[in-house]
Image (tube, helix red, strand yellow):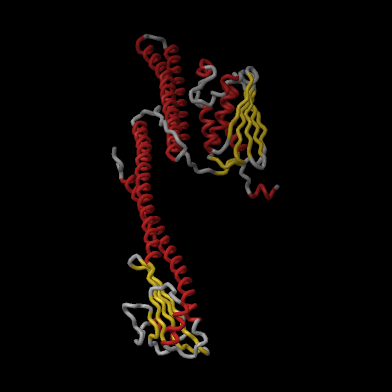
Amino acid sequence: MRLFSNSSQLRNALAYMVIASLALMFLNIYSASNTRELMFQAKYASVQDKIQVVASSFETADTLSTETVDQVISVLGDINVSRLLITDAEGKVLYDSSVNQNAVGKFALLEAVVQALGGNDVFHCTYHAGALQSYAAVPIMSRANPIGCVYVMDFDAEQGEIIENLERNILRGSWILLGGMVLCSAVFSVVSSKRMRKILLSMRLVREGEYSHKIQMRGDDEYTTLATEFNKLTDRLQESEATQRQFVSDASHELKTPLASIKLLSDSILQNDMDADTMREFVSDIGNESDRLTRMTQKLLTLSKADAETVCDHEVVDLSEIVRRVFRMLVPLADKTEVRLTANLDRGCFVLSVEDDAYQIIFNLVENGIKYNHSGGSVHVTVSHTPEEVELLVEDTGMGIPQTSIEHIFERFYRVDKARSRQAGGSGLGLSIVHELVERNFGSIAVSSEEGKGTRFTVRLPFFALEEDENDA
């Protein structure tokens, strides 16, 4: 098993260890500093108590002498320090508790003694060589003048051992904690790497075309979330691939029908001797199939364009004016099928859209209403607006749509009555185009229908209020 199979794992593990090391280093330094500071404060209080006792014993003396100092020390007894010095005002040692290095009669050439004879209290403490070493000096005052000083030096190995043991235990605990962190980092890195490799393997499989592959991952972390989103993505890819295959299959089937008709008619002309009228009829049929093929190709291109153009240059469009243009184009078809076109159009029904899209939406809906109507029927268009939206209603008195088919009518190549749709020249793409264009222009479309009575399409698009309209209002 590779603990660090890639650079990201190594970087993560090193980052964890560096952060842990810095944290533990800070903990050690902070703990050692606080521990020594507490010991220094305790030592200061202890030494100050002892040295003040000695200094206060000479408060009634005007001058210091060896005899006076000896008498006071004999009364005080042992004050439990490593060394005690008492000097006169000139720094001459009058008493020294040290036996081996007794300095009585000599001058104490110590900085602390000099500062104390100047009227200052002195204390200094350090930790060195496993022991707590401290010294202190205070002046002996008489009538506000120093007549000598008391100097105390203490070497405390017991307190030093406490500090040493405490710091050693903290350091040992830090090493153990660091080792645990390193181990946890390694385990975490291995587990994370395993989960990531599982996701990467799944991505390679999907890249190779296995869209049905799913990642099974337990937990509630980022990797699980990533796996869940990945599975949703593969579901979308599956749906997209299935839709694409269905589209190609349907398009091939629909294109094959007029091509087969053209082939059959042309073969009949070539293989048979026929009179001029029959041949003219066959050529007319070939022309009709060619027109149908052209219309179907144009609608496929329109759908492809709608899918590809996610960002369009929108402009202000008056839907009422678009309806008038559509009516002018479809009046011949309506007259031919004896369908009456009527409209109720409000003024100022402006939307922010692509003009060709708006035209295509209205044209397809009105054309369907004419084609799938009966002789003597009608198609009525209503355009109105509210402060928020423009509503386009296209109502016909045609054959209607079965309730079971309503949810499918916007699917590509779907036809309610295939035989009648082909007879009317339909390809099953018109409503798909309408649906795509409405959504691309931030609108919505709904349909209601009753068989034998007619169909009603409702398109809603965001209303765009012009400043001049607002002023008129």
Q: Which of 306 and 34 is in front in this view?
A: 34
x and y percentages locating residue 472 in the rendered image:
69, 48
Q: Does 312 sit left or right of 102 as displayed?
A: right
The front one of 349 and 190 is: 190
Residue 398 lies, in percent from the top left, at 62, 20
Q: Kindly indicate the quadrant of the structure image that contains residue 100.
A: bottom left
Residue located at (40% from left, 16% from top) = 260
Is residue 152 depicted above or below 298 in this figure?
below
Whether residue 97 sits left or right of residue 48 in the image: it is: left
Residue 16 in view: no
Pick the quarter of the image with the N terminus. Answer: top left
Near-viewer residue (348 or 270) = 348
For the point 55% across and 34% down, the residue is 438
Rendering quarter of residue 110: bottom left
- Give the answer, above or below, for where 39 lies relative to 57: above
Q: Is residue 456 left or right of residue 224?
A: right
Residue 115: x %, y % from top left: 42, 83
